[in-house]
Image (cartoon, rainbow, N blue to C red):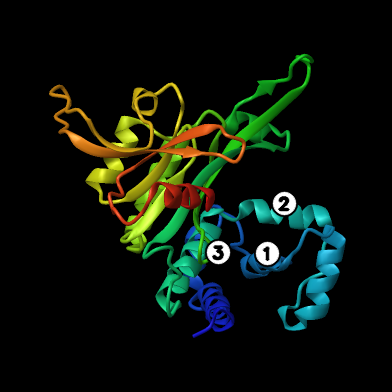
Amino acid sequence: MNRIDICKNIIQSIKEYITTPPEKLEPHRAKNHFVRKRKLSLFQVIMYLLYTSKASMFQNLSRIREDLGNLDFPDISKQALSKARQFINPALFKELYYLSVDLFYKQLPSRKLWNGYHLFAIDGSKIELPNSKSNFEFFGEMFGYPDPSRRFTMGLGSIVYDVLDDYIVHASFQRYLASERSAALEHSHNLEDLNIYQNSVAIFDRGYYSEDMFRYCVEHQHLCLMRLKQNYNIAKKCSGDIITILPSNEKDGTEDIRIRVIEVILDDGMKEHLATNLFNSHISQQMFRELYFYR
């Protein structure tokens, strides 16, 4: 089955989910909304949200009436549509996305490999959000510098991306001060739920490495590659490709674990250090450099 057929099957499955049986949509409407006969039904609002592009609301309304005539989309104001879509639980779209990811991996005939491994990259980014009372309440309010009168709010977006098969497997959006490591653990749990983490290497940038994070990967059998900050002792002691030990801690009951540290030379002559639990002797120092740049 090729990717076009997989996409068709995903679209068909989403269509079936939101059309039959109707009670599937009940948990996704706000309480006391879409319960009486209104101009806009819950199904029509969902279809509008799935169909629209970045064009203006007027253009999207015109397109949906022209292209989906059998939807009987009513003549309503932009304000009414904007209000109606606030009464749909965003969890619906997460559920539809999880459905698409699950189908993608179940129907993909073969996955691409790098030297026998699947590759995932995990990263996060800070994103400025529209100013609104609800955003300030949920994400927190920030003040600009040097202009303290400028108020704004930001969130942390994070994804795990299948590098070789070009697919975002899982995404999250959290408060600005949320931990990137916590988001990464959530992505790891998702890979476990999908059962696609075996024989895979997850690649992380600086800022993700900690002993706890590395231990989680080892204990849950996730292969990982993490870029180290230069002030870590294990980075300072490495020149080349070494295997060392993260010592046990009697207080929290942890055991000694092995860690491989690789020094790579960048094109500008700068040195970077990578930590991994991938001990395959066929993966050389230079190959780890190549692997990290897949990120």
Q: Position of residue 159 (x, y in %)?
A: 52, 49
Q: CA distance from mark 2 to mark 1?
A: 10 Å
Left or right of 244 in this view: 131? right
Q: CA distance from mark 1 to mark 3?
A: 30 Å
Indicate the amino acid at tag 2.
Answer: Lys
Residue under label 1, please give it.
45
The secondary structure type at the circle numbered 2 is helix
Q: Position of residue 107 (x, y in %)?
A: 44, 78
Relative height, residue 142 to residue 95 (above, below): above
Left or right of 60 in this view: 239? left
Left or right of 196 in this view: 133? right
Indicate the amino acid at tag 3.
Answer: Asp
Q: Are marks 2 and 3 in contact (CB under 8 Å)?
A: no
Q: Which of the labelled discs sits on residue 166, or is there none? A: 3
Task: Give the number of the mark in front: 1 or 3.
Answer: 3
Residue under label 2, please give it.
83
Indicate the amino acid at tag 1.
Answer: Val
